Image (spheres, rainbow, N blue to C red):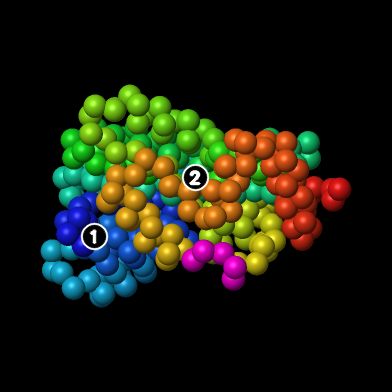
Amino acid sequence: MTNFYKGKVVIVTGASSGIGLASVNHFAALGANVVLAARSIEKLEKITEGLVQQSTSTCQQFLCIKTDVTKEEDCKNLVEKTIEKFGKIDVLVNNAGISMRAVFKDMDLKVMKSLMDTNFWGTVYCTKYALPYLLESKGSVVGVISTAGFVGLPARTAYSASKFAVRGFLETLRIEHLYDDLHVMLFAPGFTTSNIRNVALTADGSQQGETPRNEDKMMSAERVARILARGIARRRAQMVLTPLGKATLFASRNMPRVTDKVEYRMMANEPDSPLKKQ
C-alpha cells in the first residue's frame, strides 16, 4: 500500500471532518501528497500543520484549498491549484456531502436543492475539471455514496436522490472511459461515525443538531478510510461495506416489498422520526 501511494497526488473533498479527515490522515500515512478541500480554511490549515509535523518524508507535501463544492468556480480552482503545485492528479475522492431527515410532503424544496448542489453537483464539478489529468495519469475517481444510493431510504428523500444521481453519473463515466484505463469506484460505507447526522437538514432546512442513532455501534471513519485506500489500490469498481448494506441490496433485489417494510420500520423507530410507526 505504501509503495502504491508514495508520491501520488490525492484530492479529498469534505476533508475537514468524518470520512474525509480520516482519509486525509491515512493517505498521508501511506506517503501520498494530499490536497485537502473544504469550506473552512482555518480547519484545513490546522489539519495540514499536523500532517507536516507527522510526516517522515521531506518530499511529501500537502495543500489545503478553501472549496465550496456547490460552486463550480471553487471546484475549478481546486484542480488548477493542485496542478500548479504538483503537475498531476492521481486520485480524486468526491467525499463532500450533507444529509437530511424529513418526509417529502413536509420538506421545503430548498432542502432538495441543497443536497443535490453538494452531493451531486459537487461531484460533477470536481470530476469535470480533474478528468483530463486523471485520464493522463490513468488515475482514480471515487464517489462516496451510500446504501441510500442503491435503495430508497424513507425520510431521506433528497439524500437518496442525490446519491442515486452520483451513482448514475459515475457508472456512465466508467463505461464512457472503459478503454482509457480510468478507474471509477463507487464507495458505499454505510452508517459511519461522523458529524454528518448532527448537521443533517430537517424539513425547513435547519440542522437537526443531534444524531438520532447510536454512533458507538457504527464503523469508525478510520476503518472506512483504510478500506477506501485498499479499494482504490485494487481498482475496485464498487464497494458496499457493512453487512447491513449488503443484506439490504440483496433483499431489495429479491424481496422488494418485504425490504420496503423493513426499511420503513427501521427508520420509523429512530428517535423523533418524521415517519409514523405502524
Query: Is 123 on the left-hand or right-hand side of 4?
Result: right
Point out the tag, 1 or 2, that comes first from the N-terminus: 1
Q: Position of residue 143 (x, y in %)?
A: 42, 43
Image point (32%, 55%), residue name? 230
Q: Which mark is residue 145?
A: 2
Quarter of the N terminus within the rendering: bottom left
Query: Is 47 on the left-hand or right-hand side of 161?
Result: left
Query: Is 79 on the left-hand or right-hand side of 243?
Result: left
| Front residue (pair 63, 249) | 249
Q: Which mark is residue 1?
A: 1
| Front residue (pair 213, 92) | 213
Q: Looking at the magenta stretch, what is its main secondary structure?
A: loop
Q: Dot 2: what SS?
A: loop
Magenta range: 216-220
| Front residue (pair 132, 65) | 132
Q: Position of residue 141 (x, y in %)?
A: 33, 41
Q: Position of residue 209 (x, y in %)?
A: 67, 61
Image point (69%, 42%), residue name? 259
Residue 126 appears in which quarter of the rendering? top left
Q: Position of residue 112 (x, y in %)?
A: 63, 37
